Image: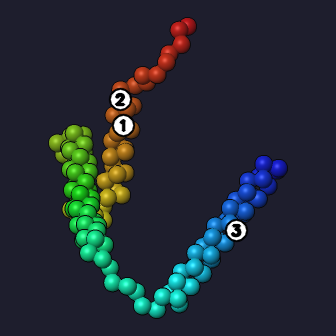
Amino acid sequence: GLIDEIIFETALNEFKAAHKRKLEADERKNQLLEDDGEKEEPTEEEEELREQVEALKEELMEERIKEREAAVALADARVACLGPFFCNPFQDKDQTKAQVHSWLSTIIRKEKTKMGSLGNKKKV
């Protein structure tokens, strides 16, 4: 009832404010493009910073690939722990990432049930 209306009204106001900010930003961008027909040449420092950003982006992509490979290796190891006849039959590691995560969560859930509850227990 009332709480839903308040939440809806707040969300709607936030949406309108965000839309207004976006329109203002677009308008400022258009004004800058119109006012400054020619861009000035970047300085040497800006060029160096751009090169550093590109190098960092490449390094980030390499690290993400390594992270993905490590996640798949971990999933394969966890699946192999289930038994000698279990394995990950999917060789295309990028497209099967969701399947590997599903398997991994299932394996973890099964192991947790094997361990039993470790929470607080009431004495009777």
Distance from Cα at disc 3 to Cα at disc 1 = 47 Å
Image quadrant assignment for residue 62: bottom left
- Amino acid type, mark 2: Lys
* Residue 33 position within the rendered picture, expressed as x and y whole percent measured from the top left: 50, 87
Which residue is pictured at 40% across the width and 25% down the height? 116
Quadrant the C terminus occupies: top right
Label 2, on which residue? 114
Instruction: Report if residue 90 is visible in the image.
Output: no
Instruction: Please report whichever mark, 3 or 1, sits nearer to the chain's N-terminal start.
Output: 3
* Residue 97 position within the rendered picture, expressed as x and y whole percent measured from the top left: 32, 58
Viewer-proximal residue among 33 and 12: 33
Question: Which mark identifies residue 118?
Answer: none
- Amino acid type, mark 3: Lys
* Residue 34 position within the rendered picture, expressed as x and y whole percent measured from the top left: 53, 90
Circles 2 and 3, Cβ within 8 Å, touching? The answer is no
Distance from Cα at disc 2 to Cα at disc 1 = 6 Å
- Left or right: where 74 falls relative to 34: left
Label 3, on which residue? 16
Q: Secondary structure at mark 1?
A: helix
Q: Secondary structure at mark 2?
A: helix
Which residue is pictured at 36% across the width and 37% down the height? 110
Q: Is residue 116 above or below residue 105?
A: above
Question: Which mark identifies residue 110?
Answer: 1
Viewer-proximal residue among 115 and 4: 4
